[in-house]
Image (cartoon, rainbow, N blue to C red):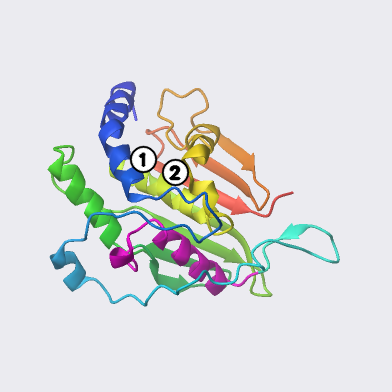
Amino acid sequence: MNKTNVVMLACVGVAAVALVIAARPDPSASPLTAPAASKPDTANAMAATSPEAPEVPASAPDGSCLSAIDQSTHDLVFACNTQTFIDRYDYSLNQSLSKKNQNHAKLYQCKNFADHTDCKYRPEAFYTMNVEFRKLGLLHGHVNDASMVEFDRSTAGNVTSVTLRGSRADPINLLTFAGNVEDFAGIWDRSEASKDNQKMFTNDLGLMRGDDAPDIGETLTVNRPYAKISCTSWPSETTMGIKCVFEPRL
């Protein structure tokens, strides 16, 4: 992303971020229980062609095993299996949507491998962003969601680290990725996705870095009470990919 694109993205962000923030409630009241603000409805055509989604549970799945102390090593570990992480993340994602649009921001098409599970994000919420950007004249055509999430696990079946991947090739993908990272942090505490903490994601973790950033290509790390978060953006001549890794805090 060159300097011109960074400036253009900053201008686009004034309108685009307003859309994203308006769609996401400030969840600082309590973990995983804050009311959700409204978000534009998904087009009927997309809803008709998308796979059916299971209903969101009325309350957050138990997350007591997400971060636990290993009694033998006294280290902080992730002690949940993959499905518990997925259920908790699904719930966190859907706290960012109005009730009528819940189930439209979930993981799906998960594939299990010997030591990890890869999942995609349901397309409806991303499709809505496409529609809203076109309404504002900020997008011509259609862009595809580059986001995915990988759950690495131990031989015992517990998750050992989680990697969120995305792209900074266009504003929709970049803003979507930032929201995905905030919502994943929200599986432990929904207040992590509040407006007061957005500086941590955009600045401390460099999620909005462009090619002109002096630390482009470097991994930036923040330690939170529940996990260590490490994010990397590469120079555009290398790749437009971006990723954040969640690991047990040292």
Looking at the image, is 160 positioned above or below residue 249? below
User: x%, y% of residue 129?
Assistant: 25, 50
- Disc 2 residue type? Ile
User: x%, y% of residue 164?
Assistant: 48, 53
Which residue is painted at 58% across and 69% down in the image? Answer: 115
Lower position in the chain sequence, tag 2 or tag 1: 1
User: x%, y% of residue 210?
Assistant: 40, 29
Residue 219 is covered by the magenta coloring: no
Residue on which disc 1 sits: 168
Residue 54, picture quadrant = bottom left
**Residue 55 in the figure: left or right of residue 41:** right
Which residue is painted at 32% across and 28% down in the image? Answer: 10
Mark 2 is surrounded, within 10 Å at the Cα level, by few (under 14), some (14 to 19) or many (20 or more) other residues, namely many
Q: Does the rendering let one see residue 143?
A: no
Along the viewing direction, whichever of 29 and 153 lies nearer the viewer: 29
Could you say whether the residue bearing mark 2 is in a helix, strand or loop? strand
- Residue that protrudes farthest toward the right in the picture: 72
- Disc 1 residue type? Arg
Which quarter of the figure is the N terminus placed in?
A: top left
Residue 82 is covered by the magenta coloring: yes
Mark 1 is surrounded, within 10 Å at the Cα level, by few (under 14), some (14 to 19) or many (20 or more) other residues, namely many
Could you say whether the residue bearing mark 1 is in a helix, strand or loop? loop
User: x%, y% of residue 246?
Assistant: 59, 52
- Kindly indicate whether the residue at mark 1 contacts the one at mark 2 (C-beta within 8 angstroms): yes
Residues rendered magenta in the picture: 80-104
Q: Does the rendering let one see residue 57?
A: yes
**Residue 100 in the figure: left or right of residue 214:** left
Which residue is painted at 53% across and 74% down in the image? Answer: 83
Which residue is painted at 40% across and 62% down in the image? Answer: 94
Residue on which disc 2 sits: 242
Most frequent secondary structure within the magenta stretch: helix
